[in-house]
């Protein structure tokens, strides 16, 4: 489908086509263009596929992620080996990286100035990520910022969040890690909820053995 998003962790993605007038002796070539234009940069996915098979699987390396852009989505072309003027193109699609938050924070309770570990894994090239949280578990309102972090390389990442005194105290906090320039399509949230509570410290009286009499005031 046009605008479809594929992920770099997918394997054996099906490529399907139909033919008329071809036999099993005819061969096709399958190309991938990150810009959807086969007069520019493209990659051969396979050569000499039997034309009448009508299907094959695609396992791509991570290098292909994020080389598509919204203005020129990627395409796949199935082309007759004997004549490059005979071909069929797919609709445009996108290949995106992947973020997975790996610590669950299930039923965790923290207070102001506690440290919350946030761990996530990046597959593909993500670049800068924003780490935000929502209160009351509102899925469309991750507008409370924690930090940003560079995740240009695939791998495991972490951030230790010291809960500030300015944080919104709430029993239903969920954390989200999202690609800064594509928050809608490349993100993940903590599976569990985090309860953030304030602290109360009694400052008076401080001495043991004090005796207070009735009808007296103490400040």
Image: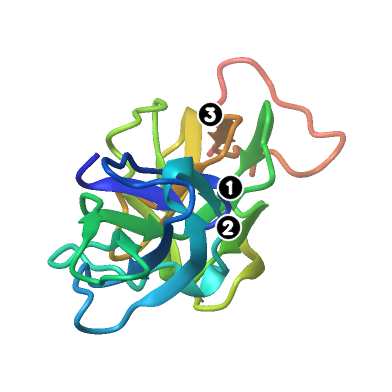
Residue under the point 37% across and 69% down:
81
**Secondary structure under badge 1?**
loop
- In this figure, which residue is indicated by the disc labeled 1? 12
Front position in the image: 180 or 4: 4
Image quarter where the N terminus lies is top left
The x and y percentages for residue 198 are: 54, 38
Quarter of the image where one finds residue 4: top left
Q: Earlier in the sequence, mark 3 or mark 1?
A: 1
Q: How many marks?
A: 3
Residue at mark 1 to residue at mark 2: CA–CA distance: 5 Å
Which label was assigned to residue 59? 2
- In this figure, which residue is indicated by the disc labeled 3? 217
User: How many other residues sit within 10 Å of disc 1, few (<14), some (14-19) or many (≥20)?
Assistant: few
Assess whether mark 2 and mark 1 are in contact (beta carbons under 8 angstroms). yes
Quarter of the image where one finds residue 126: bottom left
Residue under the point 41% across and 49% down:
6
Front position in the image: 23 or 80: 23
Front position in the image: 24 or 192: 24
User: How many other residues sit within 10 Å of disc 3, few (<14), some (14-19) or many (≥20)?
Assistant: few
User: How many other residues sit within 10 Å of disc 2, few (<14), some (14-19) or many (≥20)?
Assistant: few
Residue under the point 47% across and 60% down:
97
Residue at mark 2 to residue at mark 3: CA–CA distance: 78 Å
Q: Earlier in the sequence, mark 2 or mark 3?
A: 2
Q: Earlier in the sequence, mark 1 or mark 2?
A: 1
Assess whether mark 1 and mark 3 are in contact (beta carbons under 8 angstroms). no
Task: Please name which of the two marks, 3 or 1, marks the residue nearer to the observer.
Answer: 1
The x and y percentages for residue 160 are: 64, 62
Viewer can see residue 149: no
Question: Is residue 50 toward the left or the right of residue 214 in the image?
Answer: left
Residue under the point 48% across and 42% down:
53
Placement of 170 over or under 15, stated as above or below: above
């Amino acid at each position: 489908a046009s605008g479809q998003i594929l992920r770099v962790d997918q394997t054996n993605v099906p490529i399907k086509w139909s033919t008329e007038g071809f036999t099993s002796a005819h061969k096709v070539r399958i190309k991938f263009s990150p810009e959807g234009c086969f007069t520019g940069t493209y990659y051969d996915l396979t050569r000499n596929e039997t034309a009448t098979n009508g299907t094959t699987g695609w396992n791509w390396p991570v290098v292909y992620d994020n080389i598509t852009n919204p203005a020129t989505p990627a395409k796949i072309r199935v082309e007759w080996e004997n004549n490059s003027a005979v071909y069929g193109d797919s609709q445009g699609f996108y290949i995106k990286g992947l973020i997975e938050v790996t610590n669950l924070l299930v039923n965790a309770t923290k207070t102001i100035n506690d440290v919350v570990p946030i761990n996530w894994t990046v597959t593909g090239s993500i670049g800068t990520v924003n780490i935000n949280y929502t209160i009351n578990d509102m899925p469309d309102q991750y507008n409370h910022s924690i930090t940003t972090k560079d995740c240009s390389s695939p791998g495991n990442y972490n951030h230790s969040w010291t809960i500030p005194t300015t944080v919104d105290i709430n029993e239903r906090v969920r954390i989200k890690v999202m690609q800064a320039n594509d928050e809608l399509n490349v993100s993940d949230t903590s599976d569990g909820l985090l309860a953030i509570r304030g602290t109360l410290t009694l400052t008076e009286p401080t001495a043991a053995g004090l005796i207070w009499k009735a009808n007296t005031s103490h400040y």
